[in-house]
Image (tube, helix red, strand yellow):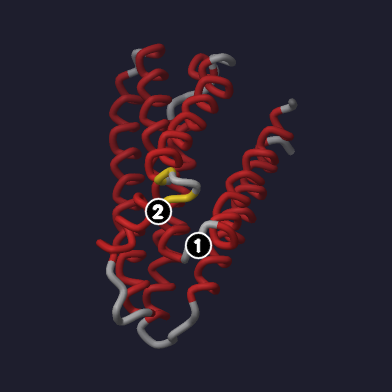
Amino acid sequence: MTPKRAVLFQTLIEALLPILGYFYWKWDASFILLFYLIDWILFWVLTVFKARKRIQFSGNVPEKQLVSKQLIIAFLCILSTSLAVFYILPNIHASFSWTERIWAFLSYSDMGIQQGFILIPLMVLSGYVTYKQQFLLPQLFRKYPVNYFTREPIKQGLLLSLVFGLILLVSYFVNFPDEVLLFGTVLGVVIYRLANRSALFS
């Protein structure tokens, strides 16, 4: 499979899973958002491993100083977006409880198996396989400076912080249905990833 086809396949799977969750596993907007937040955190963790591998190889002190700042900024973006998400759904539903929804996400059982014990390990495994095949095996840490790996988490983080900050602001004035947030998030993620990854192969 070529890298471009691998990107398209991965993006398709990432979009298909939450859609299947909505139609077949009774996922709601909170489940979809939790799924993407977990995916984003795993992406940040893998970026930390990539940056660490690059620094170990290069021994470049300025790169080490730069990556520390960039990873902190990316993590702050995750926190700000998570806070925005945390307040959006209670604004839409007065009786909404994140404690209940997080437990429901982890303990939801389909065919007698709680998805939290299956889905999260699968996401971790998928991330590791991608890290190994697309980073370690081609030894990208030898070819590119550290900001090649850290700029995407920052760009993605700033964009998501802005978008969900605006959605949070709108939620104080407009009571829109879950489906708008749910399918808007999935569509936005697909469009962004296809446009961003296609640019890498243009």
Quadrant in the rendering for residue 70: top left
Mark 1 neighbour density, 10 Å: few (under 14) some (14–19) many (20 or more): few
* Residue that sits furthest to the front in the current view: 112
Kindly identify the residue that appears in the image at 40 percent across and 55 percent down.
34
Residue 26, disc: 1
Q: Quadrant of the N terminus?
A: top right
Find residue 154 and report its horizontal and vertical position in percent.
Answer: 42, 46
Residue, disc 2: 108
Residue flagged by tag 1: what amino acid is it?
Lys
* Mark closest to the chain's N terminus, 2 or 1: 1
* Residue that sits furthest to the bottom in the current view: 173
Find residue 175 and report its horizontal and vertical position in percent.
Answer: 43, 85
Does the rendering let one see residue 157?
no
Cα–Cα gap, marks 2 and 1: 9 Å
Find residue 57 and report its horizontal and vertical position in percent.
Answer: 40, 12
Residues 67 and 108: in front is 108
Q: Secondary structure at mark 2?
A: loop
| Left or right: 89, with 151 as reference point | left
Q: CB under 8 Å between callouts 2 and 1?
A: yes
Find residue 165 and report its horizontal and vertical position in percent.
Answer: 38, 68
Residues 72 and 59: in front is 72
Residues 158 and 14: in front is 14
Kindly identify the residue that appears in the image at 38 percent across and 73 percent down.
168
Kindly identify the residue that appears in the image at 31 percent across and 25 percent down.
64
* Residue that sits furthest to the left in the current view: 99
